[in-house]
Structure formats: C-alpha cells, structure tokens
Image (spheres, rainbow, N blue to C red):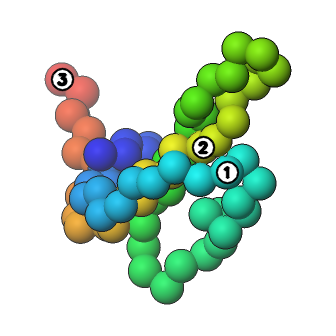
C-alpha cells in the first residue's frame, strides 16, 4: 500500500528477483500501472559493497481517495 497526499494505491506483488547492480531494465516504463521496489542484497565483506539488487514488482489493483476528517 502506497499513501500519497491525495490517494491510497494498493498493489499486489507479482514478481521478485535478484539482479545485478548494472541491470537498468528494471527501471524501464511498462504498459501497465505498477510499482517497482529496488534494494541492495548480497553484501561482500571483502569489497564492502552490495553485489546485487532485489527487485520487487507489484501491479496496481486499487486506487482510493484520501478521506480527510472535517474540523469540528
């Protein structure tokens, strides 16, 4: 679930995978509305760097407007 000032977006994860740090294809536009989460994985003590990236893809399943409470 992703919250913004105006809407609440609900996504369903459809894929997660580990890829190399130089794989830029995970940032390309897609035909459908989705969210892409990218984080580092596989820490290497010798180089003191992460070797790979974990990519999680989710499809948009619902958009709801944020409901604001009225002031008393």
Image mark for residue 53: 2
Q: Nearer the viewer, residue 5 or 26?
A: 26
Where is residue 28, by image quadrant?
bottom right
Q: Which residue is mark 1?
A: 20
| Relative to 37, residue 36 above or below | below
SS under mark 2: strand
Determine the CA span between mark 1 and mark 3.
53 Å
Q: Are circles 2 and 1 on residues that touch, CB within 8 Å?
A: yes
Q: Which residue is mark 3?
A: 72
Residue projecting furthest to the front: 46
SS under mark 3: loop
**Residue 6 appears in the rendering:** no
Q: Nearer the viewer, mark 2 or mark 3?
A: 2
Residue at horizontal 70 percent and vertical 14 percent from the top: 45
Residue 1 on image: x %, y %: 29, 45
Q: Are circles 1 and 3 on residues that touch, CB within 8 Å?
A: no
Residue 68 on image: x %, y %: 26, 39
Disc on the earlier residue, 1 or 3: 1
Q: Are circles 2 and 3 on residues that touch, CB within 8 Å?
A: no
What is the number of callouts on the image? 3
Disc on the earlier residue, 2 or 1: 1
**Label 3: how many Cα within 10 Å (few below 14, some 14–19, many 20+):** few
**Residue 33 appears in the rendering:** yes
**Label 2: how many Cα within 10 Å (few below 14, some 14–19, many 20+):** some
Where is residue 69, by image quadrant?
top left
Residue at horizontal 23 percent and vertical 64 percent from the top: 62
Determine the CA span between mark 2 and mark 3.
48 Å
Q: Nearer the viewer, residue 50 or 59?
A: 50
Residue at horizontal 42 percent and vertical 73 percent from the top: 33
């Amino acid at each position: 679930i992703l919250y913004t000032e105006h809407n609440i977006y609900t996504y369903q994860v459809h894929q997660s995978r580990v890829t190399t740090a130089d794989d830029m294809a995970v940032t390309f536009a897609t035909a459908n509305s989705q969210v892409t989460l990218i984080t580092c994985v596989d820490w290497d003590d010798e180089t003191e760097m992460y070797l790979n990236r974990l990519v999680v893809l989710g499809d948009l399943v619902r958009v709801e407007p944020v409901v604001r409470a009225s002031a008393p």
